[in-house]
């Protein structure tokens, strides 16, 4: 493979997007459509496939959560000797300010910027304050009720500023589906991203993808924004990307590989497909499978009190702050349907950390329960639920990365 293309990752969390853009991880064989993408598979064994590497390398990652950094560094240390130095914990607001004043520099010659900017203020599960978020860029309460460009709901503006400073050929931003039906938020964000680099970026119409259509065993809908540096695009690519309907050969949105109704695609991957071979927590040597929330059942009217359906995709894995993660199984009196498991003596319990990670398509060698690190940070089960729920599913990110990789020379030419 030729020299790696340089990636700068913002709002990186524990690394779902970064892992997808790296490749070389193991996933369930049912998650990979071998007919459409036979060249994505490096090897197969025991119902698992090792995915091929991509052409991308993460030079810089950034988030404000020390527990997310601990998990990221623990995994990516096997890819990069200086993984700890590649991950920066400062707020994006502070980094941009420091870069403008000359106190800090982002890496040079960046090819791609990615970022899942904070979604809490756009999610239907929250207060939906959007741009008027009452949280600061550090996650604390704002000192005033007045809208602020430094609020959590406007951090995409600072991502735009990083794009202006680093001038990537392409950027990819991700957020919850709820953003698309919150007043004119989608149009405003598309416009604001297009002003990066003094209007030097073409932002294509953002659309919603369901991760389940890419082999992820989860009903997770997310909106993606793609932006291209106009001056770097080939003339033919610029013309294609400005069309109302982008031709398939130039479309930055990856082709679906799984479907509930299209017989030409693979069936959706179910919870059973992804979880059946995991031992119960008390029989597992994996710290992430041993740990699960002990939060009591609160009644069906409360969030997180449902039992996952084994014969269907899992519900969206949330960044759960109260331990109310969905149940792996419920007792009969609470409406449990997995009767055979109950009859075999398996007890009511919520999803484990590992089960949530598998539903997000993290490989089993990605560890989330970590002892205290050299930087005096440990990752508990409650921390793990939060950072896993915040992540972009690795396999969705991999589909995005490989699609962009395959079209790179169409967009930018052989010499880019």
Image (cartoon, grey):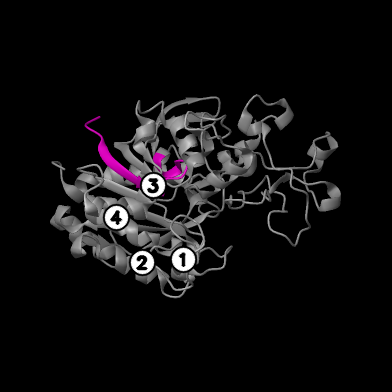
Using the numbered discs, state the Cα–Cα distance from disc 2 to disc 3 in whole angstroms: 23 Å
The spot of residue 369 in percent (x, y) is 58, 33
Using the numbered discs, state the Cα–Cα distance from disc 1 to disc 3 in whole angstroms: 26 Å
Residue at image coords 72%, 26%: 283
**The label number, if any, that marks residue 364 in the structure image:** none
The spot of residue 368 in percent (x, y) is 55, 35
List the residue tagged with mark 3. Answer: 90
Instruction: Provide the residue span drawn in magenta.
Output: 1-18
Depth check: give the residue in front, 373 or 186: 373
List the residue tagged with mark 1. Answer: 179
Badge 2: few (under 14), some or many (20 or more) residues near its Cα, within 10 Å?
A: some
Sequence-first tag of 4 and 3: 3
Dots 2, 3 in contact, CB < 8 A: no
Determine whether, in the image, residue 338 is placed left or right of residue 184: right
Sequence-first tag of 1 and 2: 1
List the residue tagged with mark 4. Answer: 97
Q: How many marks?
A: 4
Using the numbered discs, state the Cα–Cα distance from disc 1 to disc 2 in whole angstroms: 10 Å
Sequence-first tag of 1 and 3: 3
Between circles 1 and 4, the one closer to the viewer is 4
């Amino acid at each position: 493979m030729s020299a790696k293309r340089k990636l700068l990752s913002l709002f990186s969390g524990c690394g779902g997007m970064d892992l997808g853009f790296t490749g070389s991880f193991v996933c369930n064989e049912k998650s990979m459509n071998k007919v459409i993408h036979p060249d994505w598979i490096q090897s197969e064994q025991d119902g698992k496939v090792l995915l091929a590497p991509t052409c991308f390398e993460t030079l810089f990652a950034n988030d404000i959560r020390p527990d997310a950094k601990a998990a990221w560094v623990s995994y990516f240390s096997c890819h990069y000797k200086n993984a700890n130095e590649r991950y920066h914990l400062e707020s994006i607001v502070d980094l941009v300010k420091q870069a403008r004043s000359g106190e800090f520099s982002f890496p040079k010659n960046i090819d791609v910027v990615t970022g899942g900017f904070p979604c809490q203020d756009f999610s239907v599960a929250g207060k939906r304050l959007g741009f008027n978020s009452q949280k600061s860029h550090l996650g604390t309460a704002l000192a005033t009720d007045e809208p602020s460009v430094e609020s959590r709901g406007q951090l995409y503006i600072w991502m735009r500023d990083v794009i202006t400073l680093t001038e990537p050929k392409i950027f990819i931003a991700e957020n919850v589906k709820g953003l698309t039906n919150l007043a004119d938020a989608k149009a405003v964000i598309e416009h604001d991203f297009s002003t990066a680099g003094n209007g030097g970026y073409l932002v294509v119409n953002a659309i919603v993808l369901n991760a389940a259509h890419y082999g992820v065993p989860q009903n997770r809908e997310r909106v993606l924004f793609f932006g291209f540096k106009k001056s770097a695009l080939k003339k033919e690519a610029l013309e294609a990307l400005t069309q109302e309907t982008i031709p398939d050969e130039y479309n930055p949105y990856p082709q679906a590989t799984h479907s509930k109704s299209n017989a030409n695609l693979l069936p959706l991957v179910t919870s059973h497909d992804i979880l059946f071979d995991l031992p119960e927590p008390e029989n597992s040597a994996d710290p992430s499978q041993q740990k699960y929330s002990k939060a009591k059942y609160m009644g069906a009217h409360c969030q997180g009190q449902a039992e996952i359906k084994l014969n269907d995709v899992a519900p969206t894995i949330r960044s759960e702050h109260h331990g109310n993660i969905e149940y792996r199984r419920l007792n009969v009196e609470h409406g449990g349907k997995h009767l055979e498991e109950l009859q075999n003596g398996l007890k009511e319990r919520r999803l484990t950390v590992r089960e949530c990670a598998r539903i997000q398509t993290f490989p089993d060698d990605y560890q989330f329960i970590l002892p205290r690190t050299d930087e005096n940070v440990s990752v508990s089960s409650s921390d793990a639920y939060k950072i896993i729920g915040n992540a972009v599913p690795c396999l969705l990110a991999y589909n995005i990365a490989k699609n962009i990789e395959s079209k790179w020379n169409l967009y930018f030419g052989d010499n880019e």
